Amino acid sequence: MNILSLQRSITLKYVVALLLIALLSSASFYVLFKALEESKNTAYIVNISGKQRMLSQHIALALHRLHKDIEDSKINEGIVHNNILVQTLMADIKEMSEANRILSTGFLPNGSKVKLSRVLDETYFGDVNLKKRVDEYLESAYEIFKMSKHSDVDILIEKVDRLSELLLLDIDRVVMEYQEEGEEKLKDLRWLEVVTWVLIIIVLLLEVIFIFQPLTREIVDLYRKNESILNNLENEVLIRTMKLEDANVKLKDLALHDPLTGLRNRLTLEKDVERAISHERDHKAPYAVLMFDIDWFKDVNDTYGHDIGDRVIKEISKILKEAVRENDKVYRAGGEEFVILLNRIDYTDVSNIAEKIRKLIEQHVFSVDDISFSKTISCGLYHSSIIEGENVDHVLKLVDRALYKSKLNGRNRVTNVSLIHKK
């Protein structure tokens, strides 16, 4: 081999090595970037796909157990009989069918729509045709309830085993695909980084072995550059992870608070009241619940529109928060209804607070542009010293009845539960 040929060979190998490294780096960066961009997919889809895989094996196992029960009991009549195993099998078939519908269409039970990627769409409806195969698998499993001969059951079990083995491989691929598209795929991303790093090291070692010493420095420099790229990608993954954690915190906060007023919602109300009941029983710590309802609030919406109505609700929320103690909790229970939970307070103090709030709102003038008007509220008052609360529903029912009594007696007043409770 002459010098020119050697030079060409070395140059070609070096260029190929550089191209391989560039392609690996670009591919890893692109895959990581796209995966993070698409990480808004919810964990619900990942859970459903994993559950479908589990159900496919549960169904196969249940069929084997049912087959064994049939043989052991020497049943000669119809296969269908009422026992827990049959009920479990039917429930698994139904659940797997529903999971197949969700995963193949993207329509979730809460009404939202998840767009299937090209890979998943091809898997479910292309050559793999997973949607149809899952349906056929479930139909085959369901045939056991229609059979009356043991020989037919033996054939069915063999068919289901054959379908199950092939189906499991494709379902596993679907589960992995969903994991790559979901928020929980960060472990897979780190694995991808390791694979990329190993491939690059292999390329570098091949360069050291098959390319002359003068190229060693260039190879080392290339390795260092690529290592820097990987470090940058790790930092980017870390930053994205922190952003996702912050987003999850915000989503949790939204789930526990009313979006219009920022007050706690009914979900947190019930938990807090249950905690107050337990605390009162264990430590004799008195508590009170005030329930307010804006009088004739519908007239505001009908006369001025819902924007003005929302303004009224927000201003009343502000008055309620400012009128109570720092540790008291204010909730928007729904519509124009508000609840306040007050811990470690005696009856006299809570009565004064309720009356204070009633007067503050009665005296408050709601002004929006050239519109001015006043509103009143009705209140129901519950205190643990009056009636012992059995549970959350009992306490809220009592205070709601007291509120209703305030409405019946002319509104703009406070009624405690002792006036409506019949021992």
Image (tube, helix red, strand yellow):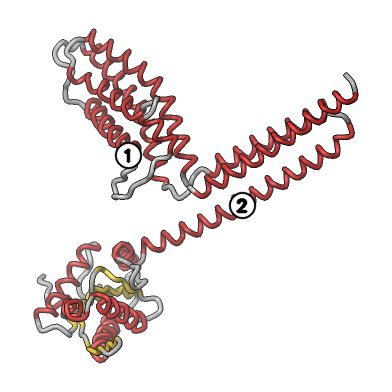
User: Three-letter amino acid code at disc 2?
Assistant: Glu
- Nearer to us of marks 1 and 2 is 1
Q: Image check: 78 left or right of 391?
A: left
Q: How far apart are marks 1 and 2 (CA)?
A: 33 Å
Quadrant of the rendered structure where residue 263 is? bottom left
The residue at 28%/32% (across/down) is: 97
Quarter holding the C terminus is: bottom left
Seen at 21% across and 82% down, the residue is 377
The amino acid beneath tag 1 is: Thr
Q: How crowded is mark 1: few (under 14 residues within 10 Å), some or many (20 or more)?
A: some
Residue 403 vs residue 371, the one in the foreground: 371
Residue 74 location, x and y as percent?
A: 20, 10
Residue at the extreme front: 4
Q: Which residue position is annotated with label 2?
A: 236
Q: Position of residue 48 (x, y in %)?
A: 37, 39
Q: Where is residue 322 in the image (x, y as percent from the top left)?
A: 36, 83
- Per the image, label 2 sits on a secondary structure element best described as helix
> In the image, is 96 to the left or to the right of 12?
left
| Residue 378 appears anywhere in the view | no
Q: Residue 105 carries which label?
A: 1
Looking at the image, residue 153 lies above or below residue 301: above
Q: Where is residue 228 in the image (x, y as percent from the top left)?
A: 72, 47
Sequence-wise, the earlier of marks 1 and 2 is: 1
